[in-house]
Amino acid sequence: MREAKLVLEDGTVFKGQAFGVEDKAEGEIVFNTGMTGYEEILTDASYKGEIVTMTYPMIGNYGVTNEDVESYTSHVNGFVVREFCNQPSNWRAKEKIDEYLKRIGIVGISGIDTRALTKRLRTEGTMKGVITTADKSEEELIAEAKAAPGLSGRDLVSQVTPDEIYEVGDGDYKVVLIDCGAKKNIIRSLTGRDCEVTVVPADTSAEEILDFNPDGIMVSNGPGDPKDAPYVVETVKELMGEVPIFGICLGHQIIGLACGADTYKLKFGHRGVNHPVKDLKTNRVYITSQNHGFALKDESLEGLNLEVTHINANDQTVEGLKHKELPVFSVQYHPEAAPGPEDSHYLFDHFIELMEKSL
Amino acid sequence: MPKREDLKKVMVIGSGPIIIGQAAEFDYSGSQACRALKEEGLEVVLINSNPATIMTDRNMADRVYIEPLTVKYIKEILKKERPDGLLPTLGGQTGLNLAIDLSEDGILEELGIELLGTPLDTIQRAEDRDTFKALMDEIGEPILTSRTATTIGEAKKIANKIGYPVIVRPGYTMGGTGGGVANNPDQLDEIAARGFKHSLIGQILIEKSIKGWKEVEYEVMRDANNNCITVCNMENFDPVGIHTGDSIVFAPSQTLTDKEYQMLRSSSLKIIRALGIEGGCNVQFALDPESFNYNIIEVNPRVSRSSALASKATGYPIAKVSAKIALGYTLDEIENAITKKTTACFEPALDYVVAKIPRWPFDKFHYAERELGTQMKATGEVMAIERTIEASLLKAVRSLEVGASGLKHEEVESWSDEQLTEKLKVADDRRIFVIAEALGRDWSIEKIHQLTEINTFFLVKMKNIIDLERRLEGEGLTPELIREVKRFGFSDREIGILTDKSEQEVNQFRKEHGIETAYKMVDTCAAEFEAETPYYYSTYERTNESEVTDEKKVLVLGSGPIRIGQGIEFDYCSVHSAWALHEKGYESIIVNNNPETVSTDFDTSDRLYFEPLAKEDVMNIVDLEQPEGVVVQFGGQTSVNLAKPLAEEGVNILGTSVKAIDIAEDRDKFINLLNELEIPTPIGDVATSMDEAAKIANEIGYPVLVRPSYVLGGRAMEVVYDEQELAEYMENAVKVSPDRPILVDKYMIGKEIEVDAISDAEEIIIPGIMEHIERAGVHSGDSIAVYPAQTLTAEQEAKLEEYTRKLAQALDVKGLVNIQYVLHDGEIYVIEVNPRSSRTIPYLSKVTGIPMVNLATKAMLGEKLKDLGYPTGLLPKQDHVAVKIPVFSFSKLRKVDTNLGPEMKSTGEVLGLDHDYNKALYKGFVAADIDIPEEGRILATIADKDKEEAISYIKDFAELGFEIVATAGTAEVLQEVGVEVEEVKKVSEGSPHVIDMIEADEVDLVVNTLTKGKVPARDGFQIRRNAVEMGIPCLTSLDTTKAILRVLQENKETGAEATVQALQDYV
C-alpha cells in the first residue's frame, strides 16, 4: 500500500496509507461518530465538498451492499479511517470498501489516528485539508490545504441536484420534492406512505412546482451553506401558504431563511446517529441521525412567525421549527434515518396528516 | 419529570453469594445504585447475604442487613424499616424472584411499600415464557416457536413436532441452570428431568435449535416518559447455542449493516416499551446470517451481567441511571457522568472495540465437562479495549491469566487433527486456542467455519494474528514489523517466544525504536465532547491522551477475573485501598481488567486503566505515570505474582517487601524463619521426584499433605493416605507445575484457625481470630469460618497473638498478613503465612468495625498503627457471632465431585450474623441455600474411617425424628447402636439402589464421607453428583454435619424465628 498523507490547514500532518483511489482529495474535514452506516454516509449528497472521517476505527467490516445507498454515487471528497476491512462478512456484501471506493473514484486514507484527528477538529473546529500520495514537502501540502475550497461561498447544491424532473411511486398524495441532494430514503419514506413523488431540481421555480398541483412539498437535505442556495429560499418563500411544506436538514435551514431567520456555521457540526433531540411540547427525547455543519441562529428566530419545536439536548441548538400560522414545519435532523435510528419516522406521518387536513 | 418527593426511604435487594451465572456484576450495579440513591438524599436500606461485597459496606447504605435472602427475613426487615419503596431490579435474578415472592406474599401491600422501577407484572410477563410469547406475538416481534412443558411426556411430544435438535430451558432460573441441547429423545429425558428440578415453577421450555445464527445483544434503557435509548449492542463471537455468559463477545456489533443494526435496535425499543420497563433491560437476538430474519431469544427486565459489561464498554453507568429512573427522573434530566456536559439521554458512540472472554474454572475441576452449551460454566470474565479486533482479542487473552501471552497453547498443539476437528465441532473453554491451532495448521477459514459455525469475519481476524506470528518467526525483530504487530496487540513476551528472544530484549528493542504505547480515553462519545473522567486503555497510536498530573500518586493492582480461589473479596480490598489513598491525598490509579467489578467503575479511583495485569502492560503505565509506588497486596495472587517482576524493574513495591513475600512462599526459607522464631510447623520436606516424595512420606508417616510449592486457592493440593495415592498424585501434580517441586508435609488433623492482621512491622492489630468448623485438610476457602473463635482458651489466643506479632515483625510486614494455624493435640502450628490480603478481610472488617484495608494502606504509606486511632494487638471479641459459609456452584458444573478437600471449590460465600452462635450458624446455612430439612429422610453412607464418629451424629438425627437410610456397612453399625435404619442397595447390588432413591427424590439430606482413596469411590461420587443434580443437600464433612445437627437441636428447643439486625447496630 502506498504511503499517503492527510494534511490540515493548521499544519497538522497525519501519515497513513492510501486506499480507494490513489490521488489527491481536498475539502473540509468533518467527522462522523456512527459505528455503522458508512455505505449510506458515502452516498449521502450532503457530504459534497467534505472529507469524511469515521471515528469508529474499523470500517468496511460488512462490505458494501450496493443496496443501502442514498444516491446514485458517492459524494464525499475523501474518506479517512483508522483501518479498513478487506475481508468483509455479510450476506448482502457485494464489494469490499476498497473496491467500492476505487470503482466510484473516492480517495481514501487509512492507518490514521482518527481519534487524535477528531479531537483536533473538536477543539479547533472543522478545517480544510488534503489527502495526497504526492511526494511534496509539508509546506507545499499545508499551502494546498489552506487553498482548498471551503463549504461556504460556492453553490454545492447545484452540483448534486438532479438535472431533470422525475416521478417516483404512486399514491393518494402528490408530493413535490425539491431535491437539493435528497437522500433516497426520504423518497422511500414518502412512497411508502402512499405518496406519488415528483422530484424536481433545486432551481425549479415555485410556479413550475405549483403546476404539478401538489398536496405537499418536501424540501430536502443537501450540502454546503444554505445561504449559497438563495434561489431555493426564494422558491420556498413563494410556496409557503400554498400547500403544506416539510423541510429536512438543509431544507430546514432554507425554511428558516425564507421566514427571515439567520444561519451560522457550527464549530464542528453534528454528524452521527446518536444525537438526542427534545420535542419541547411533549418533553420526549428522540435519538436522531444528523449530518449538518450549519444551523439556525436561535436568537434570529425572535419575533418571527416561527416556533421552535425541537432542540438538541446536548448543545440546545435549534432542531425543529413550526410556522405559527401556516402548515410549514421542518427538522434539522434526518427522520428518514439511513443510517441511524428509526425513532423519527413519525414525522412523515405528521406530514401526511397535514396534507390530509388541507386537502 | 423531576424526582419523586414522596420517596424518603428505599430498600435495595442484593444478589447474594457469587455463584456461576450471578457474580460480581451485581456488587457493581448494586453499589452504584446505592450510591446514586444516597446522592439523591434518600435513606437507603440494603439486604444482601454476601459479606465480600463493597455493597454491604456500612457506608454504602444507611442500614445494611447482612441477612439471608429469603422472604422470611426480608419481611422482618421491611416491618422494622418500613421503607417507602423497594428496588429489586439491581439484584440479579435473585432480586427479581424475591420481588415476585414478596409481592405474592402480600407484605408489600400490607405495609404500603411500592415496588420501584420496572412494574411487577412486567417482570412476570418477561420472565414467564408463555406470557412473554403472547406479548411478542401481539407486537409482532418474532420469537422462536417454542412451547412450555410440565411433564416429560409433554416435552417429548413438542420435540417430535418441532424436530430435533431442541433447546431445553427451565422457566425462572438464572445462568441457564439445567438447560441443554437435546439431539434425541434419550438426551431429552435427561435434560428435561434436570430442567424441571431447577425451574422454580416446574416448567421447561422446548424450542427449535437455531444453532449457527449470530447472537446479538442490545442494552436498552427506558424512563417513565417513554424515552428510550440503546446503550450498546454486542455481537457474540460464538454463534447461538453457547450461553452468552460463556461466549466471547465483541462490542459494538461487527458484521451488522446499519439496516440490521437499526432493525434490531427498533425491535429492542418496541419490546422495552411494550413491557413498560422503567430502567435497564437486556434483549438477546438470534440473527440469521443469511437473511433479515431474527428471533428474540430472551429479555432480562433488569440490570444483568451484560449490562455491567456494556457499562464498562461504553462508560455509560446503567445501574446508576436505572436507579435514578426508579426515583422518577427522566433520562434527559440525568447527567452524563463521564462528560458532565451532556445528558444520559443519548447513545454512546465507541471509537474502539471491546472484547470479553469468560474465565472458566476447569483449571480447578479437572474432571468437569468442559464443553460449552446453554448452561453457563464461567465464573468470571475479562474485558479488553483496543482499536482493532485482533488487538482487543489478544489483550483479553493476556488478561485471562491462563498462562497465555498469545494464541499458542501447548496442550492443544499436541492434539491430532482428529482431536482438533472434534474440539472445533464441540466448543470448550480452549476454543480460541483450538481455532488458532487449526489456522496454524493451514486449515481453511471455510473449513473452520463449517466446523465451528463462527462467522468468517472473526476467523479472518484470527488468521491475521497467525500470519503475523509467522512473519515474526521468519523475519525476526525489525522495527517495521514490531510496529505492525504491536498495533495488532502482540505482547513483548509473545514476540519474544516467536523470535527466540527474551521479553526483556523485545521490550528494549521496541523502546529503542520509539515504539511506545499511547493511552486513549473511554468517553462515551468518540471524542465529540470533552470528557472529564480519566478512564483509559492502551493502544499503539500516534497521540497519547493520558495527561499525567503533578499529584503524588500510587498504583493499585486489581485482581483480574473472578475465579475459584480469587473472588470478589480482592476487588473489595483494591477498592478500599484506592479510597484510602485518595483520603491521604494521593492520586489513586487502578489497573484491572474485570468488567464486573466496582474497582473498574470509572469513579472508584482517581484514574482507571483497563488493562491486562501482565508485567509489560503494568510497566507501560508505571513508565507514564511514575507513581511513588505500586500496591500489590490487595489483588490476590495476580498482583502478588507481579511484585517480583516489577521490583526487578526498579518499581517501588509499597508495604511488605518482595523479599518477605519470597520468604513466606519459599519452603526452605520459611521453615528456617519459623525455626528461628521457635514457632512450630508440621514437619515435611521438598521433593523433586516420586522417590524423594515417598521417602519423605515414609519418614514423617502418612497421611501427608502434598502440593506444588507455589499455590493459589489450594490448587492441586491433596491429602494422601498411602504410597499408591502419592504416586497417582505425583503424576497429576507434575503436569500442573513442571518446574516447581512438590511439598510433602505431615497432615495434622486438628482445628484450623485463621488470623488476619494489620502490621506496620512494629505493632499489629488483630481485629479477631477465626476458627474453622471443618478440620484442617478442607481448604480454608471451603470451610465454615466462625468469628470470634468459640473454643480457644485465653492462653491459646495469647499464643496466636504472639506468633502473629513475631511473624509480622520478622517478615517486616507493612500492610496485611494472613496466617493459617492448626491446633493439634493442644499445640498451635503454623501452616502458612500470606503477607497479603485474604478472602476473610471484607467479612472481618465488617463484623469488627475495623477498616482493615484502609489501615493497611496507611501502614504501607509509612504511617504508624498507634497513630491511627485504633487499639493495637488482639482486639476484644465483639458480642456477636459471624459465620462465613462457602457457597458452591456444583449444579452448573457437571461431573465435578462435590467432596471437600484441600483444593478449593466454592465460588462465593454468605454470612450468618447473630448474637447467638447457633442462630448465626443457622442463618448462614439458610443464606447459603443449604436446604436443611426439619424432618424427613437422611441417607447415610459413611466411610469406615469415619464410622465411629459419625454414628453418634446419625443417632442424634434419628432422635430428632429423622428416618435413616443407609447402605449395608453403615446400616450395620447403626443397628448395632440401636438406630432404626432402612437398608438400601449399593449400585453394584442392582436396582433399586441408592442412586435410584436419590433420583426419585425420596431423600431429604445426604451424609456421605469420602472413602480412603479416590478411585474406588464410584458409588460415593455418583451419590454426591446425583444429590447435586436433584438439589438435595449433601454433606461430605462430619464437622459440617455436626454443626447442622446442633442447629436443628437448638431450633427444636427454641424455635427458628427470624430476627434481623442492621450491621450499624452490631458494631
Image: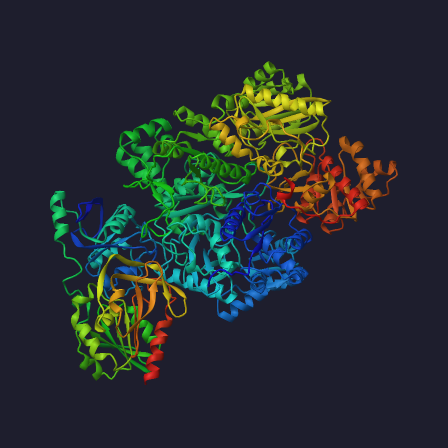
Relative to residue B103, is residue B596 drawn left or right? left
Q: Quadrant of residue B507?
A: top left
- The chosen color scheme is rainbow
Q: Is residue B401 visible?
A: no
**A133 vs B1038, nearest the viewer:** B1038
Res. B76 in view = yes
Q: Please, which residue is most extreme toward the top here?
A: B676
Q: Is residue B707 above or below residue A242?
A: above
Residue nearest the viewer, comparing A100 with A251: A251
**Residue B261 against residue B1001 in the figure, above or below:** below
Q: Quadrant of the C terminus of chain B?
A: top right
Q: Position of residue B785 (x, y in %)?
A: 66, 35
Q: Please determine whether, in this image, residue B675 is positioned above or below residue A195.
A: above
- Rendered image quadrant of residue B987: top right
Q: Position of residue B438 (x, y in %)?
A: 42, 42
Residue A47 drawn at (x, y percent): 23, 61
Residue B228, given in percent of the width and then of the height, sits at: 44, 62
Instruction: Give the tally of numbered discs.
Output: 0
* Left or right side of B395 for A290: left
Which quarter of the figure has residue B120? bottom right
Residue at the image point whose x is 12% and y is 44% from the top? A139
Identify the residue at horizontal 48%, vertical 66% (top origin). B273
Q: Pick whichever, B126 or B483, lies toward us.
A: B126
**B860 sits to left or right of A322:** right
Q: From the viewer's side, name the closer residue of B1062 and B207.
A: B1062
The residue lying at 46 percent from left, 47 percent from top is: B248
